[in-house]
Image: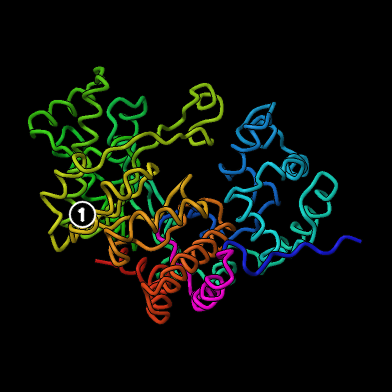
Amino acid sequence: MTAPWTLHPDRALPADPTTRDVAREIYTATRDLPIVSMHGHVDVATFADDSPFPDPAQLLVVPDHYLTRMLVSQGARLADLGVGTGPEVETDPRAIWRRFCAGWKHFRGTPTRFWLEHELVEIFGVTQRPSAETADAIYDQIAERLADPSFRPRALLDQFRIEVIATTDPAWSPLDQHHKLAEELPGRVLPTFRPDPLFHLDRASWRSDVAQLAAASGIEITGYATYLDALRERRLAFKAAGARATDHGHLSADTTPLPDDAARALVDKALAGRPVTPAEAAAFSGHMLFQSAAMSAQDGLVMQLHPGVLRDHDPAVAAAFGPDKGYDIPVVTEYAYALRPVLEAFGHHEGFRMIVFTVDEDVYSRELAPLAGVYPALRLGAPWWFLDAPDAMRRFREAATETAGFSNLSGFVDDTRAYCSIPARHDLARRVDAGYLAKLVAEHRLDLDEAVETAADLAYNLPLAAYAAA
């Protein structure tokens, strides 16, 4: 008889016995700390409605880009995994789940494997490894758990020890669900202002998106000045609803401002429906990042910037299934010149805070850590997307800490829409940090009490401080 599936207590800790013993002690001190999840994409409706999760496939497979992209790379179709709409899309959750379990081996060595193991074993009590043979039994076990009221989204906030979680919301969101949550779960679920579609004049939806901004703000947008007024109004509405941050996902990190006359002419051109060139659109998006920084210096919302991702690399997939279906690919990104305009203007401003993320790890030691290590307003965000694997997180610590130290970092944020992966992601980060700090202790570069204190900072105190309410 096969032994029940269990997870090793030392997973992701150092293999060296001496360092591992120290890492265990550090990890034990942080393992049960509350989770501060201030950068993520769980839908606010999940908490506002507090409805039961529909089934294992819709909870764990369909919305997880990490998971679906790997299976697609091995020959599955997105439609077979329940992604999209239309007659070809698989709607049987059990069939979707079987395809996932049959492809379990493809996740070996990936962070997705670590997160899924944690979810299946620690959260759902699964005792069999996923496979074609065990798929139905695991499905039934998870489905039974999901039917239990203790597995409703709000109940899981307590089970996962999530102290606060931020959603990401379009600039025109009515925020009604957040107002409801502010009454029912005060200070627990917060909005984040995401204006990206409004900053790209060459998007086909730009004018309709601006119309939504106008309707939400109550300001008629007739030109550049009223466009900025509407953005300011929405930022204040978000702040009143509990928001602590904005979120910007541009391709480039450029923050070069345009002369007001040039910005005004581009907005007039786009409002009139006249074509905007790619160069003009790129210049305007950089200009609006600068304007966003100026607004943050006034209203105190933390500005998050995570550039460097070529979205929807396969246009045919985007056309068939919509955006953000796993075809987002990192590109080389420059920060020293790109961020200079904002940091010259606001890098020492007491009311301004910027957190910068990257998926180009070459810039950690060359650009981002030195920048965060000198400008008081700048914090370096946690390893994000493609870099949130154990080895990549270790490389981040080695590349960034010597220049930026620990205090100039954001602490860990999970950047996920896969709700049940949140505790798994935070657990992995705490294990990796324990291993890195244990190495410093073993090399007599840090005392054990300092390492334990630093681990608690990275897991809990730094995220709270980085996203402190203004």
Residue 171: tell me if it is visible.
no
Depth order, front residue of 66/43: 66
In the rendered view, tell whether residue 10 sits above or below residue 211. below
Q: What residue type is disc 1 on?
A: Ser
Tell me, yes or no, whether the highlighted magenta stretch contains residue 132: no
Q: Which residues are magenta?
A: 13-38
Left or right of 143? Residue 34 is left
In the rendered view, tell whether residue 196 sits above or below residue 371. above
Residue at coordinates 51% horizontally, 32% vertically from top-left? Answer: 327
Residue 362 in picture, x, y percent from top left: 35, 43
Residue at coordinates 18% horizontally, 58% vertically from top-left? Answer: 374
Tell me, yes or no, whether the highlighted magenta stretch contains residue 25: yes
Left or right of 99? Residue 385 is left
The residue pinned by badge 1 equals: 296
Residue 69 in picture, x, y percent from top left: 59, 37
Residue at coordinates 64% horizontally, 61% vertically from top-left? Answer: 118
Depth order, front residue of 207/350: 350
The quarter in which the C terminus is drawn is: bottom left
Residue 166 in picture, x, y percent from top left: 42, 59
* Residue placed furthest toward the bottom: 449
